Image: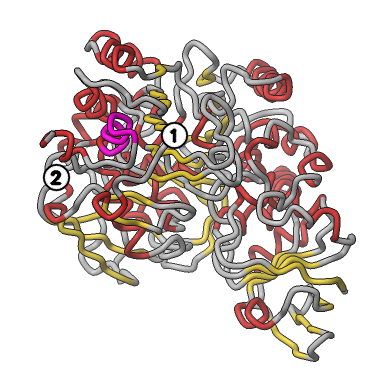
């Protein structure tokens, strides 16, 4: 069970503001984390506590394909991202690295910045403890659940290749 | 029910007789692409997972184009990581300083991608090759690692938006104006998770360079890909470049589209996207006169030879306005050489432009034209997000090469028609 304070942003949070290109000359998660959200919320990295939850509107993670974006968010200590919808490359990058994301337009609309929220990843149930409201995120298709359960895409492929040889 | 063009290519690469929107499939890849920003992350993932071989060294393309020639020690280290990997596995198509071009101009030019292909690239603008009638889409670094290891990637089969193009483009209006208009119509998430399939009688009149520009920015509408039918112009373009067998796919007559949009090319005007979203479109006439500090003509969107011919045609015999920095970046070495042999280089330099070796540089605020607070640029690039070309208080206005060149001369946002009248 995940529990944390919410940092909420609007629609179309792009990967350039999640991690500006001027920092992409390093692939180090720790270094990327230091600049996470810097261009829309310079205080984010100072205010957030490990386990906190990021909430976005529609099309979260649009723009560049940089996997540095979910890597930076995860390395900054965020436990999961809830959004009304995700841009497709951000969506697959998060799944491929095993970082939890939940698509739930109602939660994205009603949860407010600073609320305390719990998330049960196994059921997709999101509870806003501050307001008492409960939401349910869309379940992942079985295939994607398989990637997540394998611990990410590369482990999934490795297992499949090993299986094929046996 | 019939399949869209995209669905047919995906079905063929998944070894399935048919697919439908929403199906999750694993498809075989014809090309796996990465650049100097995304490839090192993929290499880390690849090595950590313990892979010791790539699926096919001829089908992996590594292009060091973003921060090259290297801007600092960290970017040099990224390139060193990619270079070592390319050497370790004998990657056939590895492009470094001296041969490198901006990836999405380079791959079609070098004949590495063609009709009917299934291409992935760890760069969001990989959707460019849809212009050739290929399925091509941007992915992340872990996907790239998976593609390099297995030759396959997973995909959710997309539904589609059909864009009917009718009419022909007026003078000074090009592919950039078409795609900006479309993004303005449907929004930055208008095609989220979907294909954009271009069709209609207007397609035939579009040059290949116009089509590359249009497919290139499908991602700016959230699209998974943006694909054109294969016609005589496509076949003429790939002739002598692309040496794999050509497979032409066509959408079925009864293919289902979630939405249909018609754009009459003959009614389009020079169009710009105002800060800070590509969907924030205006005709240039609505915003002309705005002060600018910089112009960038280049990028994977508009750094091809026809783009530079258009810009040079406007700059010829004129000067870049005092106080404006105009940076021209041919997208590939071949385009650069054409600029020299056709006399475009001389026009750019005499008019007061900086002419650079190929690089993505300023488009992503990497180097070669980063802006300070309060500055504004008209650029032929593809994104105008907050901080995209430098300081968070700088502004990017997206435009065609014709509008960018006219603005460089005028010293403010300007229409190419005005210069003609002047």
Identify the element where label 1 is drawn. loop
Task: Say which quarter of the image contains residue B348.
Answer: top left
Residue drawn at x 60%, y 32% as measured from the top left: B55
Q: Does residue B409 belong to the magenta stretch?
A: yes
Magenta highlight: main SS: helix
Subunit that carries the residue with mark 2: B
The lab-note entry on whether marks 1 and 2 share a chain reads: yes
Chain that bears disc 1: B
**As rendered, which of B285 and A70 lies closer to the eye?**
B285
Q: Where is residue B263? Give x, y as percent.
A: 20, 59
Q: Which residue is mark 2?
A: B204
Is residue B362 positioned above or below B81 on the image?
Answer: below
Mark 2, Cα crowd under 10 Å, few <14 / some 14-19 / many 20+, is some
Residue B320 counted in the magenta span: no
Q: Residue at x 46, y 52 (%)?
A: B275
Query: Distance between the Cα atoms at labels 1 and 2?
Result: 37 Å
Q: Residue furthest bottom?
A: A132
Q: Secondary structure at mark 2?
A: helix
Measuring 32% from the left and 39% from the top, which residue is drawn there?
A: B212
**Drawn side of residue B225 relative to residue B230, left or right:** right
Residue B293 image label: 1
Mark number, residue B121:
none
Magenta stretch in the rendered image: B403-411
Q: Decide which of A65, B269 is in the foreground and name it.
A: B269
Residue B337 vertical position relative to residue B103 in the rendered view, above or below: above
């Amino acid at each position: 069970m995940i529990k944390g304070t919410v940092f909420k942003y609007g629609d179309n949070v792009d990967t350039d503001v999640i991690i500006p290109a001027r920092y992409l000359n390093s692939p180090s998660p720790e270094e990327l984390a230091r600049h996470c959200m810097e261009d829309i919320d310079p205080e984010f990295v100072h205010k957030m506590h490990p386990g906190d939850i990021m909430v976005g509107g529609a099309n979260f993670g649009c723009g560049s394909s940089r996997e540095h974006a979910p890597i930076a968010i995860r390395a900054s200590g965020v436990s999961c991202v809830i959004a009304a919808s995700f841009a497709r490359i951000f969506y697959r990058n998060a799944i491929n690295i095993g970082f939890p994301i939940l698509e739930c337009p109602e939660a994205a609309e009603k949860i407010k910045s600073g609320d305390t929220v719990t998330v049960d990843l196994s059921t997709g149930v999101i509870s806003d403890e501050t307001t008492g409201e409960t939401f349910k995120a869309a379940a992942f298709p079985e295939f994607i659940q398989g990637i997540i359960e394998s611990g990410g895409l590369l482990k999934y492929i490795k297992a499949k290749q090993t299986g094929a040889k046996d | 029910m019939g399949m869209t063009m995209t669905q047919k290519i995906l079905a063929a690469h998944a070894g399935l007789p048919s697919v439908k929107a929403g199906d999750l499939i694993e498809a075989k890849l014809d090309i796996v692409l990465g650049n100097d920003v995304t490839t090192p992350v993929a290499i880390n993932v690849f090595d950590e997972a313990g892979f010791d071989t790539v699926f096919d060294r001829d089908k992996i393309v590594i292009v060091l184009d973003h921060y090259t020639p290297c801007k600092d020690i960290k970017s040099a280290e990224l390139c060193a990581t990619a270079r070592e990997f390319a050497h370790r596995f004998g990657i056939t198509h590895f492009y470094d300083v001296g041969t490198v071009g901006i990836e999405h101009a380079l791959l079609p030019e070098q004949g590495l991608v063609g009709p009917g292909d299934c291409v992935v690239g760890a760069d969001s603008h990989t959707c460019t090759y849809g212009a050739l009638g290929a399925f091509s889409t941007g992915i992340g670094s872990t996907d790239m690692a998976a593609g390099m290891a297995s030759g396959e990637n997973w995909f959710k089969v997309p539904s589609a938006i059909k864009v009917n193009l009718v009419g022909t483009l007026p003078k000074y209006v090009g592919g950039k104006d078409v795609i900006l208009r479309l993004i303005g119509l449907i929004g930055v998430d208008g095609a989220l998770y979907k294909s954009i399939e271009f069709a209609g009688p207007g397609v035939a009149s579009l040059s290949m360079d116009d089509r590359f520009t249009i497919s290139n920015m499908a991602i700016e509408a959230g699209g998974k890909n943006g694909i054109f039918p294969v016609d005589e112009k496509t076949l003429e373009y790939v002739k002598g470049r692309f040496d794999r067998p050509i497979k032409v796919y066509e959408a079925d007559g009864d293919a289902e589209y979630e939405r249909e949009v018609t754009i009459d090319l003959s009614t389009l005007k020079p169009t710009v996207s105002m800060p800070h979203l590509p969907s924030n479109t205006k005709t240039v006439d609505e915003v002309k006169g705005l002060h600018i500090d910089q112009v960038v003509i280049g990028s994977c969107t508009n750094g091809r030879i026809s783009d530079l011919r258009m810009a040079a045609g406007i700059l010829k015999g004129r000067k870049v306005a005092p106080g404006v920095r105009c940076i021209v970046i041919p997208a590939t070495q071949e385009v650069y050489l054409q600029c020299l042999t056709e006399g475009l280089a001389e026009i750019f330099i005499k008019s007061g432009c900086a002419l650079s070796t190929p690089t993505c540089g300023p488009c992503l605020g990497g180097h070669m034209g980063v802006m300070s607070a309060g500055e504004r640029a008209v650029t032929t690039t593809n994104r105008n997000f907050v901080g995209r070309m430098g300081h968070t208080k700088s502004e990017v206005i997206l435009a065609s090469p014709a509008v960018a060149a006219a603005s460089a001369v005028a010293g403010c946002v300007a229409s190419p028609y005005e210069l003609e009248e002047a």
